[in-house]
Image (spheres, grey):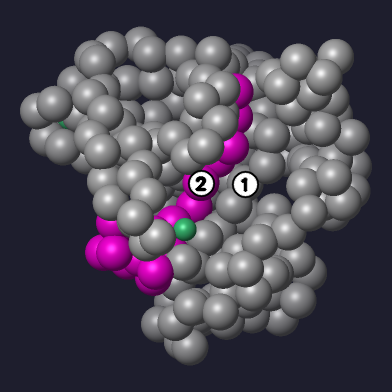
Amino acid sequence: MGLRSPLGVDVRRHPRARPLASRRSQVRVHSRRSRGIGREIECGIRSPSGGEILNAPLEGGCACGAVRYRLTSDPLIVHCCHCLNCQRQTGSAFVINILIETDRVELLAGEPQPVSVPRSGGKKQKIWRCPTCQTAVFSEYTRLQIRFVRAGTLDEPAAVAPDVHIFTRSKVPWVTLPDSVPAFEVYYDTKKLWPAASLERLDVLTGAK
Ligand SMILES: [Zn+2]
Ligand SMILES: [Zn+2]
């Protein structure tokens, strides 16, 4: 299974694939998966005694440290988007977006500023950047109540892995996708793919419940 592309791009969870930064050396990442997607993600921080694992929310920030955020719950879903917009915006082959309710992205420091970025079809997308170092930390598409947090800005980017690959029609050929993760040429049917708990959260956001 293509856990690692020929160029070493790791698109799957691989907690031991890289040494943890010393500051985070006490953190270990684990997950529980009730089904193929919608796993609950937690960072467990060892207690000083070294035994007990205490749950801690995912945190991240910009390159200069002025912007810091915390995700106060599990994501709704994690996208790996291979669309040309994401490739251009990031200067990379794809972006990893953590979809989560806007009010579950708790700002700990700084104030990311929204920038209107053109994307195909004449639409615009808001991307929030650190006002100092301009690192993009999250973005917004059509639903204001959902943030797309860029997983590469997590302190521990390997704490999440894509639940789904989208817009694979423009995927660069040297990225090999794992068979175990759903992949779509363009997009997917939310009702069919999202776990029940995430759909319930979506209903709350849209006022369906
Ligand atoms: Zn910054
Ligand atoms: Zn995209």
Q: Pinpoint residue 1: horizontal percent, then vertical percent.
A: 71, 81
Q: Residues within 10 Å of mark 2 (few under 14, many from 20)?
A: many
Residue at the image point whose x is 40% and y is 60% from the top: 121
Residue at the image point whose x is 19% and y is 21% from the top: 66
As drawn, the label of residue 78 is: 1
Q: Secondary structure at mark 2?
A: strand
Residue at the image point whose x is 74% and y is 27% from the top: 202
- Between disc 1 and disc 2, whose residue precedes? 1
Say if residue 162 shows up in the picture: yes
The outermost residue toward the left is: 132
Query: In the image, is the residue at mark 2 within 8 Å of ligand 2 by its beta carbon?
Result: yes
Residue 94 picture quarter: bottom left
Left or right: 176 with respect to 93?
right
Residue at the image point whose x is 20% and y is 29% from the top: 130
Seen in the picture, residue 43 relative to 124 is either above or below; the reply is above
Q: Which residues are magenta?
A: 84-101
Is the residue under label 2 in contact with that under label 1 (CB below 8 Å)? yes
